[in-house]
Image: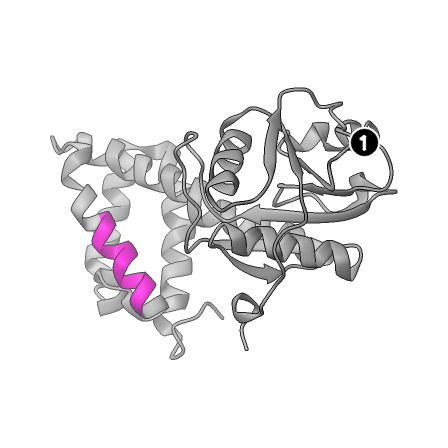
Amino acid sequence: MSDAAVTAPAPPGPVVVVGAGRMGTALVARLREAGVRVRGSERRGETASDAAVVLLAVPDAAIADAAASVVRGRLVGHLSGATTLAPLTPHEAFSLHPLMTVTGPEARFEGVSAAIAGSTPRALGAARAIAQALGMRPAEVADADRAAYHAAASIASNFLVTLEQTAATLAATAGIGREALVPLVRASVENWAAHGGHALTGPIARGDEAVVAAQREAVAERMPEALALFDALTDATRALAASPSGERS
């Protein structure tokens, strides 16, 4: 049975979401729509006397200070993907990281995966219940796995933007605008979602080394600062193409 299929109780309430940024504002709105007793606060020192759960929607570097201002006896959680539960000590603590980008208060969480952790079964249950109230699919990620989990998220999201912007810059030297690459990028992502590494196409997958050599020469001439990236990606793509399982060896 998947973690998302586990039935969880309704989130304990009321919940105070500390932090009025994009994530905090979106969480308050969506939790309220889900029927959870919730209110937001711009003050990191907020510790409402009736709060059962304090959810810290603050930058990673501010988690420890924000947690230190919360009165003992409440469940205290953070929303960081990279941060362990250590900064929440000595509270009964949990973490809940929606695996998505939040661009504004209108963001919705249905169908999104969420990494959860808890210092006690009750804290873990609260994280799972909040995730499920938002329509997310919770999965436990241990503190020892946090850095690897968050690195994977950065590669999938942040690095993808860097890669596509590099492609757009090179395409511009041939008179091709960024918008021309968008359908290709979207199709590639959809194919990868459906087929994983077996979605790989192109000259490396076909074994057409003459084309790869010509590409490398063009990159070296027009974007020499991107040559190391091209070479690293070429090596990684060769390894993927050579793998019968469609996974990097």
Residue sitting at the far top: 43
**Residue at 80% over, 44% down:** 86
Give whichever of 3, 225 is nearer the camera: 3
Magenta span dominant secondary structure: helix
Q: Is residue 50 above or below residue 115?
A: above
* Residue 190 percent coordinates (x, y): 27, 58
* Residue 221 percent coordinates (x, y): 26, 34
Which residue corresponds to mark 1? Answer: 70
Q: Is residue 124 above or below residue 107?
A: below
User: What is the total number of numbered labels drawn onto the structure image?
Assistant: 1
Residue 190 is inside the magenta segment? yes
Judged left or right of residue 222, residue 58 is right
Which amino acid type is marked by label 1? Answer: Val
Judged left or right of residue 179, residue 5 is right
10 Å crowding of disc 1: few (<14), some (14-19), many (20+): some
Judged left or right of residue 107, residue 138 is right
Q: Quadrant of residue 241?
A: bottom left
Q: Is residue 152 above or below residue 65?
A: below
Give the structural element (helix, strand or loop) at label 1.
loop
**Residue at 55% over, 78% down:** 1
